[in-house]
Amino acid sequence: MSSQRFPAVVLALLIAILATGCFRTRTEATQVDAVARFMFTGNTSDAMVTLNQNGRPIWEDLPVREGKRYEIKPGTYELIVSRDGDLVVHRTLFVDQGKTVEVRIP
């Protein structure tokens, strides 16, 4: 290799190496929460929640706080809200992954 071509070859290799670093692609993934949530609104004073899944209790007589999000696993649940021993809400709800289900208490 002639001494005149050597700097040109080195410069070409340097540009090629630097160029490959400039054109990398970036891959991003959005991950959905692996949990679901219940949120209670309305008349939550003195309300107590019982939550069952497949006949098994998940929560029993849990005091409700308005606007608080209660995390659970996605799935189908039987939701019972009582106040002073009286049944206020009785529903079967499906909660999807990453979603919040709002339950209005009368």
Image (cartoon, rainbow, N blue to C red):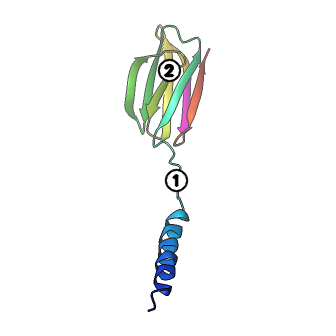
The residue closer to the viewer here, 10 or 15, is: 10
In the rendering, at what x and y percent does residue 41 appear? 59, 18
Residue identifier under label 1: 29
Count residues near mark 1 (Cα–Cα under 10 Å), then give few for <14, some for 14-19, many for 20+: few
- At 41% from the left edge and 19% from the top edge, which residue is drawn? 62
Q: Is residue 54 left or right of residue 67?
A: left
Callout 2: SS: loop
Mark 2: which amino acid?
Lys
Please tell me whether residue 93 is drawn above or below residue 49 in the rendered image: below
Q: Earlier in the sequence, mark 1 or mark 2?
A: 1
Depth-wise, is mark 1 or mark 2 nearer the camera?
1
Give the quadrant of the N terminus.
bottom left
Indicate whether 50 appears above or below 11: above
* Label ID, residue 81: none
Could you tell me which residue is drawn at 53 percent across and 49 percent down?
30
Image location (x, y in percent) of residue 50 = 44, 23
The image position of residue 26, as x and y in percent, is 53, 59
Residue type beneath disc 1: Ala
Residue at which label 2 appears: 68
In the rendered image, which quarter contains the C terminus? top right
The residue range painted magenta reads 90-95
Taken as a whole, is the magenta stretch helix, strand or loop? strand
Q: Nearer the viewer, residue 23 or 95?
A: 23
Q: CA distance from mark 1 to mark 2?
A: 29 Å
Write the residue at 38% across / 31% down: 58
Which element carries disc 1, helix, strand or loop?
loop
Find out whether residue 69 is within the magenta segment: no
